Image (spheres, coloured by chain):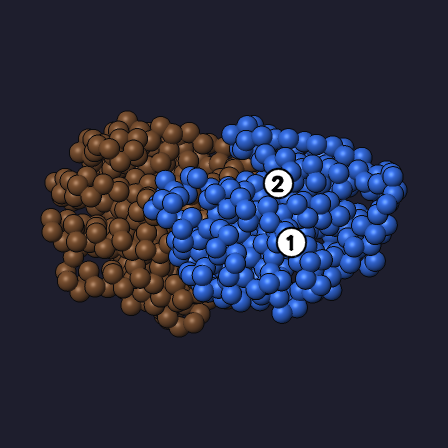
Chain colours: A brown, B blue
């Protein structure tokens, strides 16, 4: 039994929260300690545990970059209680066996609920459907399917995938990138790519696929989720699709909310990511889209890479950035502090909606009596400079290195058990 | 001068003029000498680190360093550093350990010299990186223009052809505009980068309209593989619309010159009679390249005034 003293649920008035048997047993002022373990949460904001729809854990295959365990620890430190592990591992998570392996490793680590994402197509090759039903029926209970890292570019195959997953209430999470428009692409196509001599990744390559997919999803009445939306045009298309009643949801990454293609100056590949960092106008549109709900969720696209995969020429470096540990801080800086999202809004975009999209039971629930005690405590006033050497991830490719960010996750609880206390992982 | 020469934008007007003036001094100092060698960089080591084949640029840098009495190591790392094992960083640290004072790098990846410069203590000279820049080519082009026309300020330069993939074009745009020239890029829209509107240039799709007012026409090499990628319909159509033949050359003002960074596709972007005409500076450019590269190495590694 734990008693959280003086926390502010959703930033509102301070109360005490009693946690018992994995659930929130009591909420109110001045609850008696009554033998409980005491957690002093004076001044801390309490939020439901965060849910990430988009994490790369690299296990199996690249355990030198991250393991399920190290990624889980990074997630817990970021305030997450559940993460969806993307399928582009080696071997690819395209069978019940691989998704069950990842799920079991997550259970053993016990720091967050690791929910495997299944590949849409065999080997992410975009040629034929993987055994989606077997993954859905497995112990991992897969509901989100994605070839992330690759686009399901064939429109007929995408249509079939969207239709097929309806049988088990699944969702296809699309990495929207028309491959013929992004051959050799290295960064956002525009003024900077022209000058830096890096081949451009045009916004239209993302927008064209989103436009196509929302039409397909509308036609077959299926659920579509759009990964890491990065352009102003994409936000417009999503707004239009939602106004037409299409069952489409979307996520934006923390880095696309904060950083622009200006970061490519100097050719430091830590800023190389797919989709690429875009313009200040795109960043503004993404913030507006997240604020008004057109974009449903923040997805970290946490993409750890070993040093040798980043310390190279820009073109040779793998795309991707770390995201789990700083996601909430970036949202605080870009959305909360400017007054664009309140704490209930943060809970909605980082917990409630992602859990609903992933059909996760027990996550994204309100802070209320009887609910599972998945929650975090945040010190919003704390500011710190990001030191990659101090991160829990096995990799160091943080785009926020040296940057001061607000907010510190002081504690995270998974079903009532602390995974983080005093800002440190419990295990 | 800064420690490295990574892009033409590293040079302000004073620095760029200093390089050109130094090249002229070096040329004058060596003129008529039987032994074309200066002792300036004796005891210094220059590494030519070439990840891409480029015989003429490598020889030009090698000759420049040798004429300054530097020790020269040619390191040819054919192919990609990624596919071939050792990383660029490891190679850089090896060269550093061997005491390289200057590294002249040619690389297929844009920005590779910038990365290299973060890993080594010596000076890095960009000898061409991907589709980004080739600053010494722009310096030798500027040197050649000044030599032939006597000035750069107000000179109208038409850069014609595959600007999208051309590091020569990018370097010339920045350097020539720094030095006061007026640059017009002439190309089919498919061979101009999106975002070219932010460059300090005028853009035209019509070569015939530009020629009568150009003091310099700089033709760019067109690579055969661009045709297969539908940047233009055919070599014949490209040549008709953007090739410089004798008829078009006749439209130029009397004093105008024709340049080409080489190697040329004769009959494609430039007709043989144009390339071999007295207006062509193509041979001068090659010779001036050595003087300009001597000046760059001297200023970065030798007696550069602070």
Among numbered discs 1 and 2, the one appearing first in the sequence: 2
Answer with the quarter of the image where residue A169 lies.
top left
Q: For this rendering, which residue is in front, A245 or B285? A: B285
Q: Are marks 1 and 2 in contact (CB under 8 Å)?
A: no
* SS class, disc 1: helix
Q: Residue at x 86, y 50 (%)?
A: B29
Q: Which residue is mark 2?
A: B106
Residue A143 falls left or right of residue A39: left
Point out residue B82 in the picture as x, y percentages from the top left corner. 53, 33
Q: Is residue A152 visible?
A: yes
Give the crowd class for mark 2: few <14, some 14-19, many >=20 residues within 10 Å.
many
Q: Decide if residue A33 is on the left or right side of residue B141.
A: left
> Chain under label 2?
B
Q: Is residue A381 above or below residue B194?
A: below
A402 left or right, relative to A24 = right
* For discs 1 and 2, the disc positioned in front in the rendered view: 1
Front-most of B299 and B232? B232
Percent from the top left, x then y, of residue B136? 66, 50
| Numbered label attached to residue B141 | 1
Task: Say if residue A37 shows up in the picture.
Answer: no
Secondary structure under the numbered disc 2 in the rendered image:
strand
The x, y position of residue A243, in whole percent, is 17, 65
Q: Which mark is residue B256?
A: none
Residue under the image location 77 percent in, 50 percent down: B295
**Label 1 in the same subunit as label 2:** yes
Front residue of A270 and B177: B177
User: Distance between the Cα atoms at labels 1 and 2?
Assistant: 18 Å
Crowd rating for badge 1 (residues with CA inside 10 Å; few <14, some 14–19, many 20+): many
Which image quarter: residue B55? top right
């Amino acid at each position: 039994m734990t008693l959280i003293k003086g926390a502010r649920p959703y930033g509102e008035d301070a109360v005490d929260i009693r946690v018992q048997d994995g659930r929130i047993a009591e909420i109110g002022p001045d609850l008696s300690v009554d033998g409980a373990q005491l957690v002093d949460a004076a001044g801390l904001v309490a939020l439901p545990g965060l849910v990430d729809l988009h994490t790369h854990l690299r296990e199996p295959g690249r355990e030198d970059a991250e393991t399920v365990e190290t990624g889980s620890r990074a997630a817990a430190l970021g305030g997450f209680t559940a993460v969806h592990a993307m399928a582009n591992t080696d071997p690819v998570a395209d069978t019940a066996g691989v998704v069950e392996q990842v799920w079991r490793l997550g259970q053993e680590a016990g720091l967050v609920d690791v929910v495997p994402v299944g590949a849409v197509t065999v080997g992410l090759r975009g040629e034929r459907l993987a055994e989606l039903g077997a993954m859905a029926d497995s112990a991992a209970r897969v509901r989100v399917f994605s070839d992330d890292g690759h686009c399901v570019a064939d429109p007929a195959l995408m249509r079939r995938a969207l239709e097929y997953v309806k049988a088990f209430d699944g969702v296809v999470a699309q990495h929207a990138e028309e491959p013929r428009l992004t051959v050799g692409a290295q960064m956002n196509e525009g003024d900077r790519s022209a000058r830096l001599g890096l081949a451009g990744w045009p916004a239209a390559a993302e927008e064209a696929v989103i436009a196509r997919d929302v039409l397909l999803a509308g036609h077959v009445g299926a659920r579509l989720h759009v990964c890491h939306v990065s352009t102003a045009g994409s936000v417009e298309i999503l707004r239009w699709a939602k106004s037409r009643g299409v069952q489409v949801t979307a996520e934006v990454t923390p880095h696309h909310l904060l950083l622009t293609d200006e970061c490519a100056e100097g050719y430091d590949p830590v800023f190389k990511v797919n989709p690429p960092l875009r313009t200040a106008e795109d960043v503004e549109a993404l913030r507006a889209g997240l604020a008004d709900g057109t974009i449903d969720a923040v997805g970290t696209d946490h993409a750890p890479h070993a040093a040798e995969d980043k310390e190279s020429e820009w073109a040779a470096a793998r795309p991707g950035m770390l995201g789990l540990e700083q996601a909430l801080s970036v949202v605080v800086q870009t959305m909360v502090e400017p007054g664009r999202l309140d704490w209930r809004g943060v809970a909605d975009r980082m917990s409630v909606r992602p859990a609903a999209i992933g059909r996760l039971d027990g996550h994204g629930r309100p802070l209320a009596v009887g609910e599972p005690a998945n929650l975090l405590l945040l010190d919003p006033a704390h500011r710190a400079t990001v030191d990659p050497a101090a991160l829990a991830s096995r990799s160091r490719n943080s785009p926020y290195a040296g940057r001061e960010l607000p907010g510190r996750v002081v504690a995270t609880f998974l079903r009532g058990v602390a995974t983080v206390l005093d800002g440190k992982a419990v295990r | 001068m800064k420690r490295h020469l990574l892009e033409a934008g590293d040079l302000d007007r004073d620095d760029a003029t200093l390089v050109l003036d130094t090249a002229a001094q070096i040329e004058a100092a060596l003129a008529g000498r039987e032994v074309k060698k200066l002792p300036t960089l004796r005891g210094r080591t220059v590494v030519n680190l070439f990840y891409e084949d480029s015989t003429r640029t490598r020889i030009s840098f090698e000759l420049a360093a040798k004429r300054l009495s530097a020790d020269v190591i040619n390191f040819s790392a054919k192919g990609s550093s990624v596919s071939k094992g050792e990383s660029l960083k490891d190679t850089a640290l090896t060269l550093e350990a061997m005491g390289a004072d200057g590294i002249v790098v040619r690389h297929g990846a844009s920005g590779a010299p910038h990365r290299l410069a973060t890993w080594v203590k010596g000076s890095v000279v960009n000898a061409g990186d991907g589709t980004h820049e080739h600053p010494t080519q722009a310096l030798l082009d500027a040197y050649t223009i000044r030599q032939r026309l006597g000035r750069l300020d107000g000179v109208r330069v038409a850069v014609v052809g595959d600007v999208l993939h051309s590091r020569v074009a990018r370097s010339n745009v920045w350097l020539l505009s720094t030095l006061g020239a007026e640059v017009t890029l002439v190309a089919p829209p498919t061979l101009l980068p999106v975002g070219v509107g932010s460059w300090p240039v005028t853009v035209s799709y019509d070569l015939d309209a530009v020629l009568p007012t150009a003091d310099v026409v700089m033709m760019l090499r067109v690579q055969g593989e661009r045709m297969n990628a539908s940047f233009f319909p055919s070599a014949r159509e490209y040549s008709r619309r953007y090739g410089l033949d004798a008829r078009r050359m006749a439209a130029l003002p009397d004093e105008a010159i024709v340049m080409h960074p080489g190697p040329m596709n004769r009959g494609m972007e430039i007709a043989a009679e144009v390339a071999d005409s007295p207006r062509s500076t193509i041979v001068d450019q090659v010779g001036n390249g050595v003087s300009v590269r001597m000046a760059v190495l001297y200023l970065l590694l030798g007696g550069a005034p602070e």
